[in-house]
Amino acid sequence: MLAELVGGAAGRAAEPRLKLALTLLFLAREGEDWTVKGVPAATWALLFGLHDHEKLGADRVTAAIKALDTSGVVLADRRRGREPRILVRHERGDGSPWCSPVGEKGKKQAEEDLYAQLPRTFWANGWISVLSARAVAALVILLDATWAQKGTDQVDERVRDDLVIKRTKALRWWHLTEEQLDQQYAVSRDLFDRGIKELLEWNLVESRKRTSGSRTTWGDRRWYRELRVRLEVLNAPVLEVWNGQVPARVGHSSEPSITAAP
């Protein structure tokens, strides 16, 4: 679905489609019937940072709702004179009902049921407004690739008096190969790299060079790039980061030379 939303054929439509799909999923999970209703297209456009949100931006959102409906990602009840009632469907795009990847409520989460999460601050702190579609796509891909990797740093967080959950604190370094991008995510290296470049500029991702082995007489070392999402930056408002107030780096426990910030 991600490739369909942001691939080359999507063009300028990629931004409202991807941002709308993610936001609908984020909002719909709060309800019982996975439905979002009563939101004007201009409001969506303002949230997504689209130009001329009252007219052109709103038109782009309306087109995005229609495209997601046609592809089976959502079911939109568009009645004349009323804001559409949007039912989130399964991301397979076959029109089947949405089902939570963690299964039934109350059951212990299995290892295979873990899934990457964008924190609420992605919306609340304005990141969804300033990032392009390719940057959001690259962020989602890198989160998905590293979220459930063995050794991911987690801390206990009390949600209620009777409920304690594991919150992901820091993610591992990771190198995404051409095969992974093509076979698992069906996106081009160019699209991913351009998105990562934008995320690096915002300090949302950090990068380091690694070598696959020692140098030999037969040729030079093979270098590759490892990436890591900085979850702590997502928790800061966009304006603060824009003004240079970047949160202190939270190191991973797999990095013995770095002391993790509290």
Image (cartoon, rainbow, N blue to C red):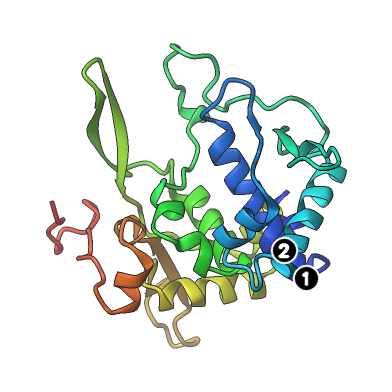
- Name the residue that disc number 1 marks: 11
Q: Could you tell me which residue is drawn at 35 percent across and 77 percent down?
A: 242
Amino acid, disc 1? Gly
- Location of residue 209 in the rendering, given as x and y in whole percent from the top left corner: 38, 76
Q: Could you tell me which residue is drawn at 75 percent across and 40 percent down?
A: 84
Q: Is residue 124 above or below residue 75?
A: below
Q: Could you tell me which residue is drawn at 46 percent across and 47 percent down?
A: 118
- Location of residue 30 in the rendering, given as x and y in whole percent from the top left corner: 51, 29
Q: Secondary structure at mark 1?
A: helix
* Left or right: 228 in relation to 28: left
* Left or right: 57 in relation to 114: right
Q: Can residue 7 be seen from the camera position used here?
A: no
Q: Secondary structure at mark 2?
A: helix
- Name the residue that disc number 2 marks: 14
Q: Tell me if label 1 and label 2 are in contact, CB under 8 Å.
A: yes
* Left or right: 257 in relation to 97: left
